[in-house]
Amino acid sequence: MNSVTPEPAGGADNAAWTAGPIAGGRSGFRRAARIPSLVAGSLMLLLIAALALLIPWLSPYDPTTQDLASFLQAPSGSHWLGTDQLGRDLLTRLIYAARTDLAIMVLAEIVPFCTGILLGMLAGYYGGWINTVVSLLTDTFIAFPFYLIVIIVAFASGAGAQGIYITFILVGWIVFARVSRGLTASLRQREWVASAQTLGLPGYRILLGHLLPNILPQAIVVLMTDMVGVLVAIVTLGYLGIGIAPPTPDWGTMIADGQSFMTTAWWLSAVPGFAVVYMGIALSLLGDGLADLWRRTS
């Protein structure tokens, strides 16, 4: 992935050689409010997050309790999106599945994000054998198809969230390491870094206090984009039957279960499929908006 080198927030003439805030206080909020994609993506995510948090109080139905007398009902006043082949309310399961998949998506990104940023910064700043090892690892993993690695590791780890976490801990850090390594190597050549080195500041202070604030905006933009891929991978694993184990609601499992009823109850697969597209659009808009905000304030 190509990285874009940012101007340091503090500028070359910053006497303290520190990165100032990218956008702070009311000024930053006003800038963000003028970016349509950022506002739209944020509102879309807030809507699904609010529904996911409030669904236990909004729905009278249990997402796993079967009611065979109500199977395959069409959308109605009592079941807004109808029921599935086991009589479970589809809207309730859809929102509970959002809680499951989005929680896994976020948790599966935490360790790879932190690990990738750390390894990339060390490789870009110090170079030498650290850079060689990080480059070798990233090139090795990139040589294999991403979904092949995901499926093999998830299948070996067994169905459930544990396999998904292990998978993304192993391979998810690569994109963040590549971005942070490129940015760090570029920023390391700036005068304000050389000045900090001349003053005798230790490497960890330069990395954490001066380089990291300038790397994080771009890394967060990449994180938003990468989350779309993680979500699709989670849904794909569920669809293949090696993701979240039933009866826990999961968008991938719901899509797979509805395939047999496409001619009689098309909504069983279409609704969770739409939910995946909705989240992909929301995260993409948020990432584009953050990138636009970062460009305007850098």
Image: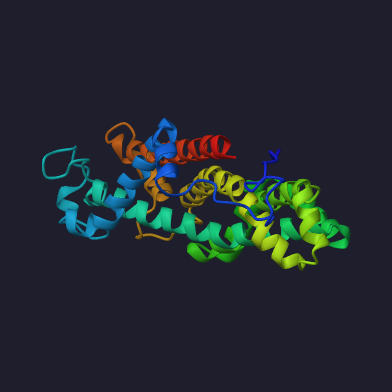
Residue 42 visible within the image: yes
Query: Against 187, is 123 above or below?
Result: below
Instruction: Return the residue nearer the eye: 291 or 191.
Output: 191
**Which quarter of the picture shows residue 28?**
top left
Q: Position of residue 125 (x, y in %)?
A: 79, 57
Quadrant that contains the C terminus: top right
Q: How is the image coloured?
A: rainbow
Q: Position of residue 101 (x, y in %)?
A: 42, 54
Q: Residue at 24% x, 55% y: name it.
A: 55
Quadrant that contains the N terminus: top right
Q: Residue at 50% x, 51% y: name it.
A: 234
Q: Is residue 247 left or right of residue 132?
A: left
Residue 170 visible within the image: no
Q: How many labels sit on residues?
A: 0
Q: Is residue 119 left or right of residue 267?
A: right
**Which quarter of the picture shows residue 169?**
bottom right
Instruction: Return the residue nearer the eye: 21 or 219.
Output: 21
